[in-house]
Amino acid sequence: MRMQVRTHSNVTHIDFLPLAELQERLPSKAVIVTDDVVSKLVESDHRRVTVPSGEPSKSMSTYVDVVQQILSLGIDRNTIIVALGGGVVGDLAGFVAATILRGVTFLQVPTTLLAMVDSSIGGKVGVDTPQGKNLVGAFKPADQVLICPEFLDQLPARQLTNGMAEVWKYGFIGNAPELEKLRGGQSPLTEIIFDCLDHKARVVEEDEFETSGLRATLNYGHTVGHAIEKVLGYEMFLHGEAISIGMVVEARLGELIGLTEPGTAAQVAEDLASAGLPISWDGLRDTEPLIAAMRSDKKATGGNLAFSLLTRLGDCKLVRDVDQESVRAALTA
């Protein structure tokens, strides 16, 4: 199985392959950036830089450390940076590839479901700051993405469920028939990954740099979800878990402002709960820190809040200047 993502700036080649073939597909001039968990799963003779697993590694300090380690290897413009890991490693390594020597070739080898279906394509790379998530970064599409579904056999159950949050998101925002397949639980994971990548590829090809509002629909649930992550210091919830709660809140918000078809929030909550994902958190009642975090969201302008909201299951749009009282009501409902 293979596909391509064609944008104005790049063509990303996506190949599904057995894990046994991965080693021979990695270029000899590659430098692998990975974390201390994934590093134990893949043996290779390639040069590698290893960071601690988890969201705290997606930081400016880790970025500087990785750059210094890679430069000390004596690289040149023909060096290829390979991200071997989940979304954190992919975002971090991609930012390194975008900036080191003013940009070198970048290859993604996602090892989690979340990275396979979402963060490995599209070109958004970067790091977190104390002010918010993904506030420093670049657009750096991978030149190639190698997907080995066998990595999922070694993934902890919680991480697999975590990735399913992004899978359900694709159904909620633009693929209503996919929701029925997910509810039936009959689609193989490889087919699910392919369908999600196909959806995202079409969106990215049409709105690569998020200028028309179409690509922003991929951030459904993320304004609230990122705020939860920031308030909690990126602890307690994994990314997909926070986004799951965010999708329920944002569906409720859409209903409160009269945009979303009534009953949508209840269905979103039911679907996500059936997948084993969290749909609420007591901390939502402390609204002020969350709203303050939302103001730093990249969709916000002039301090006014913006959300990607459902109009109904299978349709989503970017909505700007959402009033804060409605946001508070959605958080505390």
Image (tube, rainbow, N blue to C red):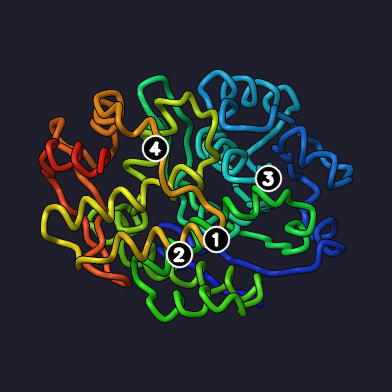
Earlier in the chain: of badge 4 and badge 2, it is 4
Q: CA distance from mark 4 to mark 3?
A: 21 Å
Q: CB of mark 4 within 8 Å of CB of mark 1?
A: no
Say which mark, if any, is on residue 271.
2
Q: Is residue 223 left or right of residue 306?
A: right
Q: What is the quadrant of residue 225 in the picture?
A: top left
Q: Residues within 10 Å of mark 3 (few under 14, many from 20)?
A: many
Q: Amino acid at mark 1?
A: Ala
Residue identified by numbered label 1:
275
Q: CA distance from mark 4 to mark 1?
A: 21 Å
Where, by quadrant of the figure, is residue 171 drawn? bottom left
Q: CA distance from mark 2 to mark 3?
A: 28 Å
Judging from the image, what secondary structure is the residue with disc 3 in?
strand
Q: Which residue is mark 3?
A: 85
What SS does tag 4 mark? Answer: helix
Q: CA distance from mark 4 to mark 2?
A: 21 Å
Label 1, label 2: how many angstroms apart (C-alpha)? 7 Å
Residue at horizontal 56 percent and vertical 34 percent from the top:
96
Tell me the amino acid under the disc marked 4. His
Q: Amino acid at mark 2?
A: Asp
